[in-house]
């Protein structure tokens, strides 16, 4: 079994953060403590990492506060163990996923985290994953399993439960004509939220629930366009697939002279901190960013230490946060 930073910390009777400072030659450690840690590393046969200290976080949504928060929390979980994260924003027209990873594997990247990147897209190109397997670089996913079907750790929010929480909240407020502003088809989280929404509406007596779903982009403009279409059908409430889409819906409704929530209620999804300060403050289904990032960090640390970790998808429960953007259905 490869000796890790945890073993050294236990042997030296210091914290893992202290061992990390010694390994990375940082200040803040006394000479005596540094010598104790160095001795523990020598006795255990711990090998200082000369490369491979980088963990790449690949995401298409770097401007979204939720994904930025998750990336920051992953960094916080890994930093005490001598691992540094590098953010790789991939999007149409920019540097692509394979280009980033091809450059990084030559620099000795330790692991890769796909944060709602190609792992969320049905039929995505599998060349990136093949490259990582060939170079024996471990990888994990957040909010979507991988297209190649190879069993790796994946950490996702339960999208079906998220839709159920939103629909149940609105139904209890008296809404029956509830619409969904969803992300594009072929996006795994969007597709799962749509299925959850349709099931939740069907259980509550709606026969044609699918006609209340409008597919759009995960943007403010996408939410605005979806809201216009749903209100034209007579919707009194909208479940959005992201907080950005929800804010776009609010903007679009106001431009039509409608009040939120007096005329139309709106529920977001993600739970980014900014939603508490919008006007009105947004009711949203919050993804558990802290628990997701913590489990991702633990998994990455085990993988880079050559320890086995459970594969397959682990689902985390979301939480409904009720604020001012939802209210009783209009008469």
Image (cartoon, rainbow, N blue to C red):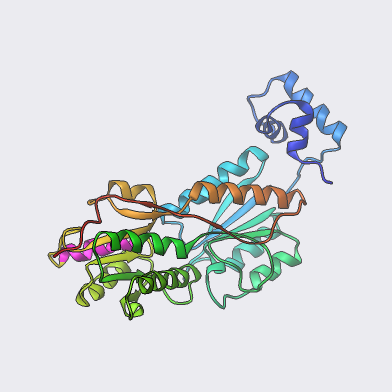
Residue nearest the observer in this picture, 48 or 118: 118
Taking the spot 69% from the left edge, 59% from the top edge, the residue there is 105
Residue 63 x, y percent position in the rendering? 42, 56
**For the image shown, how many numbered marks are present on the structure?**
0
Q: Is residue 289 above or below residue 330?
A: above
Residue 313 x, y percent position in the rendering? 61, 62
Residue nearest the observer in this picture, 47 or 262: 262
Say whether residue 175 is visible: yes
Is 4 left or right of 284, judged from the image as shown?
Answer: right
Residue 93 x, y percent position in the rendering? 47, 70
Taking the spot 45% from the left edge, 61% from the top edge, the residue there is 161
Residue 12 x, y percent position in the rendering? 77, 27
Is 40 left or right of 214, judged from the image as shown?
Answer: right
The magenta stretch spans residue 109: no
Q: Is residue 71 above or below residue 207?
A: above
Locate residue 174: give its quadrant: bottom left
Locate residue 179: give its quadrant: bottom left
Q: Which residues are magenta?
A: 243-255
Is 55 left or right of 2, judged from the image as shown?
Answer: left
């Amino acid at each position: 079994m490869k000796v890790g930073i945890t073993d050294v910390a236990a042997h030296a009777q210091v914290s893992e953060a202290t061992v990390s400072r010694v390994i990375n030659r940082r200040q803040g450690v006394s000479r005596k403590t540094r010598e104790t840690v160095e001795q523990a590393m020598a006795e255990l046969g711990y090998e200082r990492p000369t490369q491979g200290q980088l963990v790449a976080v690949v995401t298409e949504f770097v401007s979204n506060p939720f994904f930025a928060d998750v990336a920051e929390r992953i960094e916080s979980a890994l930093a005490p163990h001598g691992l540094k994260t590098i953010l790789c924003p991939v999007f149409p027209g920019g540097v692509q996923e394979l280009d980033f990873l091809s450059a990084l594997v030559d620099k000795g990247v330790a692991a890769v985290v796909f944060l709602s990147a190609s792992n969320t897209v049905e039929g995505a190109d599998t060349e990136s994953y093949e490259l990582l397997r060939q170079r024996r670089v471990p990888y994990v996913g957040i909010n979507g399993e991988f297209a190649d079907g190879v069993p790796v750790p994946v950490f996702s929010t339960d999208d079906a439960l998220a839709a159920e929480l939103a629909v149940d909240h609105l139904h209890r407020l008296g809404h029956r004509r509830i619409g969904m502003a969803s992300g594009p088809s072929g996006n795994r989280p969007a597709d799962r939220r749509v299925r959850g929404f349709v099931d939740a509406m069907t259980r509550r007596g709606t026969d044609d629930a699918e006609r209340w779903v409008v597919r759009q982009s995960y943007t403010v403009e996408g939410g605005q366009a979806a809201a216009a279409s749903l209100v034209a059908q007579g919707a009194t409430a909208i479940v959005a697939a992201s907080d950005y889409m929800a804010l776009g819906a609010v903007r679009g409704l106001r431009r039509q002279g409608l009040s939120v929530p007096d005329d139309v209620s709106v529920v977001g999804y993600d739970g980014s901190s900014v939603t508490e300060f919008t006007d009105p403050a947004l009711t949203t289904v919050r993804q558990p960013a802290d628990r997701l990032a913590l489990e991702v960090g633990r998994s990455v640390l085990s993988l880079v230490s050559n320890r086995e970790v459970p594969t397959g998808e682990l689902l985390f429960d979301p939480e409904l946060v009720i604020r001012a953007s939802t209210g009783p259905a209009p008469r």
